[in-house]
Amino acid sequence: VPVIDPFDGYQRILSTELSLQRAAAKSLHFAASISCSCLTRLRALKGHMHRFNTINIWSRSDSMKGITELLRMSLTNGAPNLSKLSIRNGSHPDPDNDFFQRSLNDWLGSGLSVLLNPLSVIRLDNIGFDWARTRFSRNLVELWISNITLANRYQVIKLLDSLCSAPALRDLKLIDVEAILEDEDESISEDESLNKVSFPKLQSLYLESLPFDFLKFLFETIAPGSYCLTLKPGDEIRYDYPSDEEIDDEDIFELLRSTTIHRLILSGGEEGFWDTADGLRSILESVVTVKSLTLNHYNIDHSILKALKAPKSRSGKFPNLDTLEIYGAVFTFELDDLKPEFKRVLQSHPLQRMVLGGYCRPPSAEDYSLDEDQELVAWFENRVPNFHLCSDPDYVPERPNWQLWDV
């Protein structure tokens, strides 16, 4: 059931009502890309909210009005079948205006608990919560939180308390989350903030673009487990928040060495040191437990490939990769010229899966994309059990996709 404002052409006012009629008694997926101009169209949903088992709202309004109106309708009509809720607020309102800074708890009151209770999947982007008043249920297995700022240490602690209220949680993503960890409130003890938290059923923990101090806090606070930890550092890892104090590279290496990381995703062109051969080598030497490495937007030359090659005697000081993915790369030499270095990479890692995507930009020739007919591609196909050539040379999986039609 769509409620989407077209970017051009005439609005199809009846599309929502017709979709509801044609769906008969089926369980429905509701996807809404809304702005202030389409709020009146939401009235067609009254009396139908109980039919939805997934709700995905992408708001482009400067306020929370559209989001809260839809959620209130769910509470009024009842939503016994609702299992997935995704809410994305695309606006960036004035941070000094208290009206826009109200949390979803303030908007919905006790109704928020009723709304959250049946959910197995929750995705929140740029949505404020009062974590001290938020509890999840034993039904929750997947939680995505992105683009929020935790205003003080108390909110950080209460966020972790809220996460612990979901004993069945299997998949947790924290993306672009900033937190103020230095708090003048003396009522919050240091011991309380450093208590270990554990998620007994957690299978996947994904951390992306987190400031150094918050990432360090999470590493120290979340107990080790059998889950797979994926780290995608951005420019933020080089700074504390909100001071913007720059962190020494060695402090970053020490932090990475302090925990078990299973998958590492690196992007060239960041402020980070890892887009150079020396920087890439240094970060790999700090994440010896990594099994899967993804490189996005890298200039691939002889020096980068040498940085990927494991030493003959690892002595526990270099990863043993079984997966290598390269997306959106620029190969600055002819592929055949890079074959000897690629061969050494394959000899030094037990690769079971490899993805290759990008352009060739040799010094004395025009750019060309990779294709199945090239000798090096065929060579990879014969040597890596699961080799995939990316058909779109520009494709880069920047982050887990927010899919409006995620059914």
Image (spheres, helix red, strand yellow):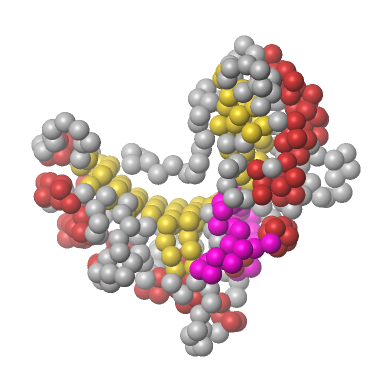
- Specify the principal SS of the magenta part: loop
**Image-quadrant location for residue 369:** top right
Query: Does residue 230 show up magenta in the picture?
Result: yes
* 127 up-or-down from 42: above or below: below
**Magenta range:** 220-248
Image coordinates for residue 253, horizontal then vertical, percent: 72, 57
* Residue 291 shows in this picture: no
401 left or right of 352 in image: left
Q: Nearest the camera: 282 or 59? A: 282
239 left or right of 321 in image: left
Give the residue furthest to the right: 313
Q: Residue at x 51, y 80 (%)?
A: 183
* Residue 73 shows in this picture: yes
In the rendered view of the protein, which quadrant contains the N terminus? top left
Q: Residue at x 74, y 53 (%)?
A: 286
Give the residue furthest to the front: 364
9 left or right of 339 in image: left
Image coordinates for residue 280, horizontal then vertical, percent: 71, 44
Image coordinates for residue 338, horizontal then vertical, percent: 74, 24
Q: Residue at x 55, y 84 (%)?
A: 189
Q: Residue at x 59, y 67 (%)?
A: 245
**Image-quadrant location for residue 385:** top right
